[in-house]
Image (tube, coloured by chain):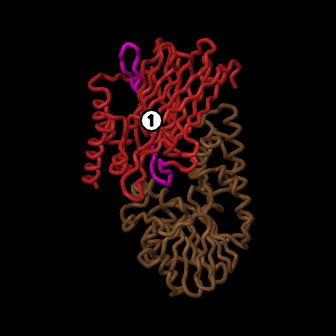
Chain colours: A red, B brown
C-alpha cells in the first residue's frame, strides 16, 4: 500500500511540471494520476506544495497572508464538480488592491486553477468562483500586491468518494448552450461588505476535462475549456483570467468592483479550441 | 450480506422478482448491496435489471436467480451509470448476458470510469473491488426497444436527462410492472446527478406509464404506481422553490445550500448525505432559468 501510493505521488509530481508549464492538463494526465488515499492525504500535503510552489513561483518567498487575503470553501465538498470558493482581500491591508491572484488546488492534475490579474483601481475586494476538486486537497489563494510581494491563504477541502464525479452532468445540454453568458448586477447594499456593487458573471461552457475516450480510436478527446477571460468596464480592465480545467462547468464568477462612469461591462472569453465568446451589458444604477 | 449469505429475492408479480437494497451508502459491511435489483423470467430466457454494487453481491444475485430458474439470462439491463447498479456487470457478462443500456451510457461511463474505480476503492476496500470492471452496454436504446423473453415482452425506454443523462426504464407488459431505476426513489433521498428540471419536467410522462406497480431504484421491492412518485415530487418542488427564492435574493450558492430543502429532512433516509449535493447541483442549474 505504502509503496504503491509513493509511486502514485511520484507519478503525479512528474506530471505536474508539464501541466503547469502549459496550464493545460492533457487528458492522459487525468487518467494516470489517480486519486490519493484518504488516509495519507495530510502527510504528503506539504511535500506536494513544496514542489508545486517552486514550479509556479520559482523561489520567490511567499508570506503568510496575515489577513491580507483569505479563502473560504466548504470543509467537505457537497459536489466534487462544483466546490464554491470565496476569496476576500482586506482593503486596509492592501490599500492599492492586488496585481494578481493565483488559485491552486494541490492534488488536481492541473493544480493551477486560475490566475487572475486585476486592473489598476478595479476595487475588487471579493471574488468567488466554483472549482472541481479531485480529492482531499489544500485550496490556496496566493495574492500578489502591486509591489510584487506574495501572500498566501489556504483551506482544506475533503472531496472524495461517492458518485459525485467531477464530470459534466448533462453533456448534450452543455454542448447545445456553449458560449451563452449572463451578468447579474447587485446593488451596493446587496454586496457583502456594503462598499461596492457586485457582479456575477456566468458563462455556459462544459469546461470539459478531456476525460473521455473516442470510442473508435480509444485516444482521449482533447480537453475543451475556457482559458482566457477578460472583464472590462468600457476600456478599463476589472480583471482578466487565465485558467485550466479545474474551473467548474459553466464558469461562474462573483466579485465586487469600483464603477467608473456609466460605460457598459464587456466580457470576452476564449476557449482552448479558439472559440471566442463575447457579450456586454449596460451598468444598472439601481442594481437588482 | 456477508460472504456466503443468501440474497433474498421477492416474487412481486408472476415471474417477476426483486431484491430491495439497504438505505445506506456502499460500504464493506453491506458489500455494495444498496440498490434494488430485478429478475423477469420468460418462457425461453430471463432478463435482469441491474447487476449490483460488487462482484460478491452479483454472485449472490446469480445464485438466487439459479434457485428460481435455470433459463439463460439473455439480457442485463443497466438502468444508468452509477456504481451500485453496474459494478456487478462482469458476473453476468461471463454468464452470457447481453448488456443493454441508454444510448448515453457508454459516454457517461467513459467520463467517470477512472474516478469510480479509484474513489470506490476507498469506500469499499481492496477486497470488495476485486474483479470489478466498468463494462459498457453492447446493445443501446435510442428511444424505445422491445426485448423478447419468449411469451413475454419487456419494453425499454430511454429518458431525457433526469437522475442522470442516461436513465433507462424496463416495463414488463405481462404483469404491468415498471422497473424505474433511479427515476424513482422511496425512503432513500433522491440524488440528482443529471438535471432537476429535466426530472421534474418528465414526472407527468413517467406517471402516465400504465403500470400497476413499480420497483424503485431505491426503496421497497415493490410499490403502488403512480402513488410512489408523490414523495419525490414534493421534495423536488420544495427544493426548487427554496433555491429559486435564494437565487432571486442574490444569496450565493455556498449559503443557499445550507438551508434549501431542509423542511423535508424528516421524510427521508440519508438526507444529510445527499441533500447538500442535490442543492448544489440544482442551484447551478436553476440560476440559468
Rendering coords of residue B66 (x, y %):
50, 84
Of A161 and A186, nearer the camera is: A186
**Image position of A239 with respect to B148: above or below:** above
Q: Which residue is drawn at 61% across and 29% down?
A: A183
Asked whether residue A42 appears in the rendered view, the answer is yes
Q: What stretch is highlighted in magenta?
A: A141-167
Of A140 and B149, nearer the camera is: B149
Secondary element at tag 1? loop
**Image position of B189 with respect to B148: above or below:** above
Rendering coords of residue A32 (x, y %):
33, 50
Quadrant of residue B284 within the rendered picture: top right
The mark total stands at: 1
Quadrant of residue B182 within the rendered picture: bottom right
Is residue A142 inside the magenta stretch? yes
Q: Residue at x 45, y 67 (%)?
A: B54
Rendering coords of residue A242 (x, y %):
43, 30
**Image position of B105 with respect to A243: above or below:** below
Rendering coords of residue B6 (x, y %):
50, 78
Is residue B179 inside the magenta stretch? no
Of A179 and B73, nearer the camera is: A179
Q: Which residue is drawn at 29% across and 22% down?
A: A60
**Image position of B237 with respect to B54: above or below:** above
Amino acid at each position: 500500500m505504502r509503496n504503491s501510493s509513493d509511486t502514485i505521488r511520484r507519478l503525479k509530481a512528474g506530471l505536474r511540471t508539464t501541466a503547469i508549464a502549459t496550464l493545460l492538463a492533457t487528458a492522459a494526465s487525468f487518467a494516470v494520476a489517480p486519486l490519493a488515499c484518504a488516509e495519507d492525504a495530510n502527510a504528503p500535503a506539504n511535500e506536494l506544495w513544496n514542489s508545486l510552489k517552486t514550479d509556479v513561483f520559482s523561489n520567490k518567498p511567499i508570506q503568510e497572508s496575515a489577513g491580507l487575503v483569505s479563502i473560504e470553501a466548504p470543509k467537505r465538498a457537497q459536489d466534487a464538480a462544483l466546490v464554491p470558493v470565496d476569496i476576500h482581500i482586506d482593503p486596509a491591508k492592501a490599500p492599492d488592491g492586488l496585481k494578481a491572484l493565483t488559485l491552486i488546488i494541490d492534488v488536481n492534475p492541473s493544480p493551477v486553477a486560475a490566475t487572475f490579474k486585476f486592473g489598476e483601481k478595479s476595487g475588487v475586494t471579493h471574488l468567488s468562483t466554483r472549482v472541481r476538486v479531485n480529492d482531499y486537497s489544500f485550496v490556496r489563494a496566493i495574492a500578489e500586491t502591486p509591489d510584487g510581494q506574495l501572500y498566501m491563504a489556504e483551506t482544506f477541502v475533503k472531496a472524495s468518494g461517492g458518485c459525485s464525479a467531477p464530470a459534466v452532468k448533462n453533456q448534450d445540454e452543455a454542448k447545445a448552450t456553449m458560449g451563452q453568458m449572463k451578468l447579474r448586477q447587485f446593488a451596493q447594499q446587496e454586496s457583502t461588505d456594503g462598499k461596492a456593487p457586485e457582479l456575477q458573471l456566468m458563462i455556459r461552457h462544459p469546461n470539459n476535462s478531456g476525460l473521455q475516450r473516442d470510442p473508435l480510436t480509444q485516444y482521449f478527446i482533447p480537453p475543451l475549456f475556457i482559458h482566457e477571460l477578460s472583464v472590462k468596464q468600457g476600456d478599463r480592465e476589472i480583471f482578466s483570467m487565465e485558467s485550466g480545467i479545474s474551473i467548474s462547468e459553466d464558469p461562474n464568477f462573483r466579485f465586487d468592483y469600483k464603477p467608473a462612469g456609466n460605460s457598459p461591462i464587456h466580457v470576452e472569453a476564449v476557449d482552448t479550441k479558439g472559440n471566442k465568446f463575447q457579450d456586454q451589458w449596460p451598468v444598472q444604477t439601481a442594481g437588482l | 450480506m456477508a460472504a456466503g449469505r443468501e440474497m433474498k429475492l421477492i416474487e412481486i408479480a408472476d415471474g417477476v422478482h426483486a431484491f430491495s437494497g439497504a438505505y445506506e451508502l456502499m460500504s464493506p459491511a453491506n458489500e455494495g448491496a444498496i440498490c434494488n435489483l430485478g429478475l423477469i423470467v420468460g418462457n425461453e430466457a430471463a432478463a435482469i435489471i441491474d447487476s449490483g454494487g460488487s462482484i460478491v453481491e452479483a454472485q449472490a444475485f446469480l445464485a438466487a436467480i439459479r434457485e428460481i430458474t435455470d433459463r439463460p439470462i439473455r439480457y442485463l439491463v443497466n438502468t444508468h451509470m452509477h456504481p451500485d447498479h453496474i459494478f456487478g456487470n462482469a458476473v453476468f457478462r461471463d454468464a452470457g448476458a447481453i448488456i443493454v443500456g441508454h444510448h448515453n451510457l457508454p459516454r457517461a461511463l467513459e467520463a467517470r470510469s477512472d474516478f469510480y474505480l479509484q474513489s470506490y476503492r476507498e469506500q469499499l476496500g481492496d477486497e470488495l473491488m476485486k474483479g470489478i470492471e466498468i463494462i459498457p452496454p453492447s446493445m443501446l436504446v435510442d428511444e424505445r426497444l422491445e426485448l423478447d423473453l419468449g411469451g413475454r415482452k419487456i419494453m425499454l425506454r430511454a429518458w431525457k436527462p433526469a437522475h442522470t443523462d442516461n436513465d433507462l426504464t424496463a416495463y414488463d407488459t405481462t404483469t404491468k410492472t415498471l422497473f424505474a431505476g433511479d427515476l424513482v426513489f422511496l425512503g432513500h433521498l433522491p440524488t440528482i446527478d443529471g438535471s432537476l428540471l429535466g426530472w421534474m419536467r418528465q414526472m407527468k410522462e413517467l406517471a402516465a406509464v400504465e403500470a400497476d406497480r413499480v420497483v424503485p431504484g431505491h426503496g421497497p421491492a415493490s410499490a403502488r404506481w403512480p402513488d410512489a412518485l408523490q414523495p419525490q415530487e414534493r421534495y423536488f418542488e420544495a427544493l426548487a422553490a427554496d433555491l429559486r427564492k435564494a437565487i432571486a435574493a442574490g444569496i450565493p450558492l455556498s449559503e443557499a445550500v445550507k438551508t434549501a430543502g431542509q423542511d423535508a429532512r424528516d421524510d427521508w433516509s440519508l438526507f444529510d448525505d445527499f441533500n447538500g449535493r442535490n442543492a448544489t447541483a440544482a442551484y447551478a442549474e436553476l440560476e440559468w432559468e
